[in-house]
Image (tube, grey):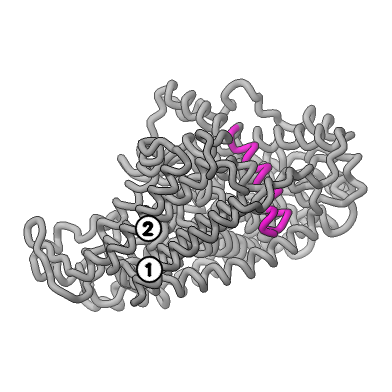
Amino acid sequence: MTGTHHFLTDQRIGASPIHRLDPRAKIVGFLTLTVVGVSTPATEVWAFALYYALLLFLVGLSRLPLAFVVRRAALVLPVVAVVAVFMPFFHGGGGRTFHVLGGVEVTEAGLMLLSNVLLKAALGALSAIVLGLTTSFGELIVGLDGLRVPRIFTLIVSFMYRYSFVFTEESRRMHRAMESRNYRGRWLWDAKVIGHMVSALFLRSYHRGERVYVAMISRGYDGTMPAASPPGIHSAEVVFVVCLTLALGAIRTGAAL
Amino acid sequence: MHLPDGFIDAPTAVATAGGSLVVVAYAMRRAGRLMGERTVPLLGVTAAFIFAAQMLNFPVAAGTSGHFVGAAFAAVVLGPWAAIVVMTVVVAVQAVGMADGGITALGANVLNMGVVAVLAGYLVHRALRRILPHSATGYLTSVGVAAWASVVISAALTSVELAVSGTVPLHLALPAMASVHAVIGLGEAVITITVLATVLASRPDLVRSGPLAGRIPGSRPHAHGTPGDDMAVREATDPTDDATGRPAGDATGDATTTRRRPWGFLAVALAIAVTLAVVVSPFASRAPDGLESVAEAQGFAQAGTGGWNLSPVADYRLPGISDSGLATALAGAAGTIALFAIVLLLGRSLSGRRTRVVAPPAGALHPLGGHEHTDHRHAGHSHAGHTHSTEVPEDREPHHSHTGAP
């Protein structure tokens, strides 16, 4: 949607014990972090502070440059923030009311909602980003396969992943060509031009896909891809998942009390 | 429309995830039975195409823009089940790979943009195909309305989920989301019509629910025989009715009568749509409350409350009518008629030149033509496919994009 091209790099950034973990352990770990974080009531601010501290600790452990992680998050979160900022005004709700900016009223419940949404959205986005930076897309697919996600699904995802770079580049080229010819669509009826671009993109994509598919068949493709085996579950993976789960469980239990 | 983490509460997240899981699992079974794993690469290609196409913004009004979603397009081209699988893959990759949409909200996002957007688009398309005249205009109209409905319905569902979670009350979220996406949906309709008209002109074999689908016995590639047999049937009948550009298959049976009086069918369709709008729209916006009442009390109601008064029929009510229920109903009716006229005109203007349904290249690959024994045909005939089809050159701009230059 917003960030166009700075996603899904196939290289992991850096190297560390976290990078070397089995992708299954990392998927389970970061998913648990997100789910537990999102299920925590927003009133427990200290719990969120601890979640973020935990995430920061993991970033440190994986030796990722913090600025890099933050810059990634900055591509996604402003969109969320723009939507969320309006919510307190719509929410109504109870509690004390505050006056901001020339008489518009904001309730305490509304502000609580805003902090809830922002804290959780940022937590989810950051853990997805850290997972993505420490795990290559190929490893993610292997991990999902290992977690018994249906094979047809992971196959489509892996083909989509490979093609998406080609087609994204193609659509950027078309866009650049359009802009260099001084096209400036302003109104809805100008959308037809984009329609022609999308048509061309589809036909080109499909032609290319067919050519590649025929080439694959002629080289013996039979519907299965040779699957890489994940590194395997060893003591490091067990320690990672157990420690993370224990820490999260402790924080969550504390928040519930 | 991608919901991030924290926008919906736990029960909503679990319920939507459960619903999505059931439907997507069923869709995978259905799609898998139709295709076999061999054509999975082409579904991956389609998913990557939709992913890339979603990055092309189209203008809506000065300054603002929307982006192509592609759910209705996928439904028409691939059929509903394969389309659900493809859209689910796109939404999932956006969540995991780009942090666009939350992991805990993935079920809701898949439900909105994968399942419901596809099914709504497909059902509207099929329903209108029955009602509308079997002409190129009728076909493209059904596609355009389906694309619009798909966007608006999934936006409405998003606002319902936000309301159920207690994030934004329904009487504020629904009109806001629906009105913004009613405009964005027009762009989606324009693009979907354009793309389908172009694809039908050069590669009609790729479109599963094309103008010919169901009109000729055995015309569905997966139903009987191979895609090749299907082509043979098409070529045996008169290829195209040149005067109207209508596919030849339409000249059979009851289609002859529908051609004579297309306006009767249009009138029926319009009546149904208007009735729906009149009956449903009063539920959409109830009495003003929350911000609106605050705004009225503070005296800045005229200044536009949330910045969402984009539509000419602001707040879904017509000016000058005091009874709010009646006014809302009238506004709904007016909006529906206007929309219908716009889409009809678009369909007509776009279809005139482009929907000459040419004979498809023999043995062209269809994602759903996955019979085991057809594979060697694919390999053999796709070369022929390239010489016959209207090639879009790889290394330069397509010939139609010069229409954008001033």
Say whether residue B351 is left or right of residue A97: right
Which three-letter amino acid code belongs to the residue tagged 1?
A: Thr
The quarter of the picture where the N terminus of chain A appears is: top left
State if disc 2 and disc 1 touch (CB < 8 Å).
yes
Looking at the picture, how far across and down is residue B388, in whole percent? 78, 30
The amino acid pointed to by label 2 is Tyr
Q: Mark 2 points at which residue?
A: A51
Q: Can residue A86 be seen in this view?
A: yes
* For residue A14, side relative to residue B286 (left or right): right
Residue B253 location (% of width, % of height): 78, 63
Which circle marks residue B157 in the picture?
none
The residue tagged with tag 1: helix, strand or loop?
Answer: loop
Inter-mark Cα distance, 1 to 2: 10 Å
User: What residue would you read off at disc 1?
Assistant: A40
Subunit under mark 2: A
- Judged left or right of residue A96, residue A28 is right
In the displayed structure, B297 sits above or below B400; it is below
Residue B340 showing in the rendered view: no
Where on the picture, by quarter, is residue B290? bottom left
Say which residue appears at 45% left-offset and 51% top-offset: A127
Query: Badge 2: few (under 14), some or many (20 or more) residues near its Cα, within 10 Å?
Result: many
Residue A162 on the magenta span: yes
State whether the magenta stretch is mostly helix, strand or loop.
helix
Point out residue B389 in the picture as x, y percentages from the top left corner. 75, 32
Q: Does the magenta stretch include residue B91?
A: no
Q: What stretch is highlighted in magenta?
A: A145-165
Residue at the spot x=61%, y=61% of the render? B122
Q: Which of marks 1 and 2 is nearer the N terminus?
A: 1
